[in-house]
Image (cartoon, grey):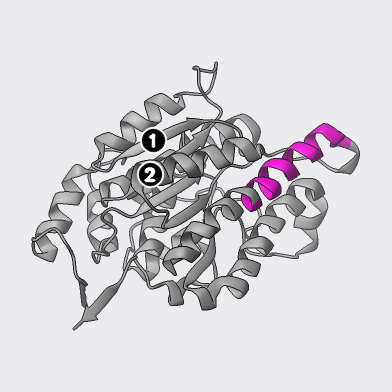
Amino acid sequence: MGKVRNINGGAIAVGHPFGMTGAQITSTLINSLQYHDKPNQKLNREKILKFADLKDQTIIMSGGSRGIGLATAKALSAAGCNVAILSKTDEPHEGLPGTIHTAVEEIRQCGGDAIGVVGDVRSEDDVTRLVDRAIERFGKIDAVINNASAIHLAGTLDTPMKRFTLMNEVNVRGTWLLTNKALPHMLKTGSGRILTLSPPLNLASHWLARHPAYTVSKYSMTMLTLSWAAELGRHGIAACALWPATLIDTAAVRNVVGGGEAARSPAIMADAALALFGRSPEQTNGRTYIDADVLREEGVRNLSVYGGGAQPAKDLFVD
């Protein structure tokens, strides 16, 4: 997955099955993307797609009915991936746009196949059902994206046990459960990716002090990912974490953190995730990434097209 050779500063796909030139493939995919906010974001996409061979790769994801997860699923679909998502949003919810059913349709419209399983990432039965459905439909699992997350930004005395439990069950248990259930299928093929949306381990005291329960749950996601990188790298499975440099304009962020005009589009995280999937597993294994840094490494200099204004608001855990 994502094998790319660089030649004289450019890049070509290795063994690409489309029967087209690299330029034709890139042009086709650029024109197929519909989720960007502004047309000139296509210019960034041209720099990001050095084109990795992602066609017919199967990605399973927790969440994905809206926000960063949906944007990422659509980007991967446009690159030729099959996507299976797990989400509780079976019916429209006041204040939260979209359902798992509308998300699957949007993902399919980008070019790849997609399925959705209504379920909770905390439930072993539901996660098993997602994995089984993905194997039944697509025959394999090539990557796991741990996207689902719960947030409650408060100090110790203002964090009820139900909130503490929820964050640890979704963020930590959910990340463990989805990866654990997909792992046998990736080990069977001797290759795979684990991408977790969690922050670098910033142990500055102000992050530890502000919201201890949430901080511990998100850092635990990162620790699990780094542990898998150490454990599974020799088996051909690469694990890394990705986090936004700024607030991202999603329903969850608007409802909990705020941000408004100072928040960037989810498209920046989707583009960064796609760029990581285009790199060799050895290059990404065991690393924690910030979205803006990933795009700059890909030659993207103009990040203003993702919104956020002249000074986007920094995300949590980013100094």
> Marks 2 and 1: in contact by CB < 8 Å?
yes
Q: Is residue 168 shown in magenta?
A: yes
> Could you say which is closer to the camera, residue 105 or residue 293?
105
> Could you say which is closer to the camera, residue 298 or residue 164?
164
Task: Give the SS element for disc 1.
Answer: strand
Q: Which mark is residue 83?
A: 2
The image shows residue 92 at horizontal and vertical percentages of 49, 17
Q: Earlier in the sequence, mark 1 or mark 2?
A: 2
Magenta stretch prevailing secondary structure: helix
The image shows residue 243 at horizontal and vertical percentages of 54, 56
- Residue at far bottom of view: 8
Q: Is the C terminus in the top left, top right, bottom left or bottom right quadrant?
A: bottom right
Residues drawn in magenta: 158-176
What residue did someone put label 1 on?
Answer: 115
Mark 2 closeness class: few <14, some 14–19, many ≥20 residues within 10 Å: many
Q: Is residue 171 shown in magenta?
A: yes
* Residue at 14 percent of width and 50 percent of height: 28
Q: Is the N terminus in the top left, top right, bottom left or bottom right quadrant?
A: bottom left
